[in-house]
Image (cartoon, rainbow, N blue to C red):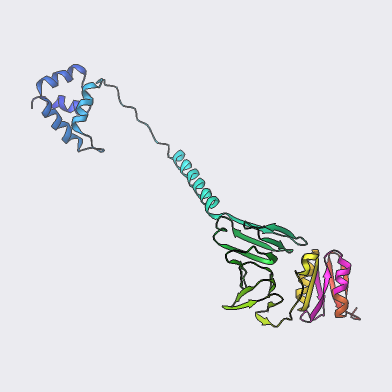
């Protein structure tokens, strides 16, 4: 082939219009197509030789250099990071949907679940559940104490660190505190699973676990827990549990001086008068108390 230089210039897009016309006259199109095809295999991406030739026919073969554009990778990474954040946020918004209700010290809260079941949450307690999945799975997690009025339907479960309470439609109270787990059934039938053992509770029955040990509890005849009426009641409960409840209901710090906090207390205290509440606990146990700043100290009669 006599015009190799012109053909190479053509491949590099360096021919003038006149040079291009001369090349076409000296070489047939088929030869040019083959040259274009094999030359294209040396670069990526590959192109169709015939299509390249047709484009060539209509192109204005100027010698101007093609523009080179540089990708700004900093901007690319920023956009990518924003997209990842948006996708992650969207995932948790649409697929997590965890709802929670929480009370602080000396606070109660009443609310309704998606199935219109009612919950009363005692002080320093928390309930959480997946609202998106609630229609198919009525399951919630409880930390603290709550009273439930459950609408009839599929299984309703309350999970705690000490056990799982399962019902279909009933009224019951669950209390889960440090070293203390208790379930009262007020209506219907309650199933309580603790340490892989399941117990059925009809109305008036209680399951109580203290320090990991299941205890015998007398039947009761109340229609709802006393704390709903702003009064905490106890039946043979260790003093340390009673003190903890006093602290939750009144935002107190109570210390003991020379007192056995394992002694049992039976009685109640009001949530509306701190002085009366302190007396209601200390007098039956033959104790007294004094106030030092924000701290209350329990001690035995005659000790001070």
Query: In the visual, does 52 lie left or right of 169?
Result: left
Q: Is residue 249 above or below residue 93?
A: below
Q: Is residue 203 magenta?
A: no
Q: Residue 203: percent from the left, percent from the top?
A: 70, 74
Q: Does the magenta stretch include residue 260?
A: yes
The residue under the point 88% across, 71% down is: 290
Q: In which quarter of the image is the N terminus?
A: top left
Q: Magenta residues?
A: 253-280
Residue 236 position (above or below residue 155): below
Q: Kindly indicate the quadrant of the structure image that contains residue 60.
A: top left
216 in relation to 192, above or below: below
- Report the front residue among 183 and 114: 114
- Tell me what residue is drawn at x 70 percent, y 83 percent: 216
Instruction: Examine the rendering and report whether any part of residue 54 can be seen.
Output: yes
Q: How many marks?
A: 0
> x%, y% of residue 119?
69, 61
**Frontmost residue, 19 versus 49:** 49
* 3 to 288, vertically: above or below: above
The one nearer the camera, 113 or 64, is 113
Whether residue 303 sits left or right of residue 227 in the image: it is: right
Left or right placement of residue 180 versus residue 21 in this view: right
Q: In this view, does 248 lie to the left or right of 58?
A: right
Residue at left 58%, top 62%?
138
The quadrant of the rendering that contains the C terminus is bottom right
Please say whether residue 252 is visible from this viewpoint: no
Quarter holding residue 278: bottom right
* Residue 215 spot, x, y in % from top left: 69, 82
Q: Residue furthest top?
A: 18
């Amino acid at each position: 082939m006599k015009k190799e230089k012109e053909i190479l210039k053509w491949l590099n897009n360096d021919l003038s219009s006149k040079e291009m016309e001369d090349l076409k006259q000296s070489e047939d199109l088929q030869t040019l197509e083959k040259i274009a095809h094999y030359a294209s295999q040396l670069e990526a991406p590959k192109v169709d030789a015939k299509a390249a030739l047709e484009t060539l026919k209509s192109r204005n073969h100027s010698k101007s250099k093609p523009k080179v554009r540089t990708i700004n990778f900093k901007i690319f990474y920023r956009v990518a990071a924003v997209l990842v954040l948006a996708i992650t946020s969207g995932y948790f918004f649409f697929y997590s949907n965890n709802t929670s209700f929480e009370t602080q010290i000396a606070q109660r809260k009443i609310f309704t679940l998606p199935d219109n079941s009612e919950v009363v949450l005692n002080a320093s307690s928390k309930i959480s559940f997946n609202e998106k999945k609630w229609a198919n799975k009525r399951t919630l997690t409880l930390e603290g104490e709550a009273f439930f009025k459950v609408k009839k339907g599929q299984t309703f479960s309350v999970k705690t660190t000490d056990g799982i309470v399962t019902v279909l439609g009933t009224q019951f109270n669950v209390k889960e505190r440090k070293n203390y787990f208790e379930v009262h059934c007020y209506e219907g039938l309650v199933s309580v699973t603790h340490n892989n053992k399941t117990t059925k509770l009809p109305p008036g029955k209680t399951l109580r676990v203290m320090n990991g040990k299941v205890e015998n509890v007398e039947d009761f005849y109340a229609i709802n827990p006393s704390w709903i009426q702003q009064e905490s009641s106890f039946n043979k409960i260790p003093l340390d549990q009673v003190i903890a409840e006093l602290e939750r209901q009144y935002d107190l710090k109570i210390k003991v001086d020379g007192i056995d906090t394992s002694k049992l207390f039976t009685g109640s205290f009001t949530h509306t008068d701190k002085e009366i509440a302190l007396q209601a606990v200390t007098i039956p146990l033959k104790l007294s108390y004094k106030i030092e700043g924000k701290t209350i100290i329990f001690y035995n009669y005659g000790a001070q």
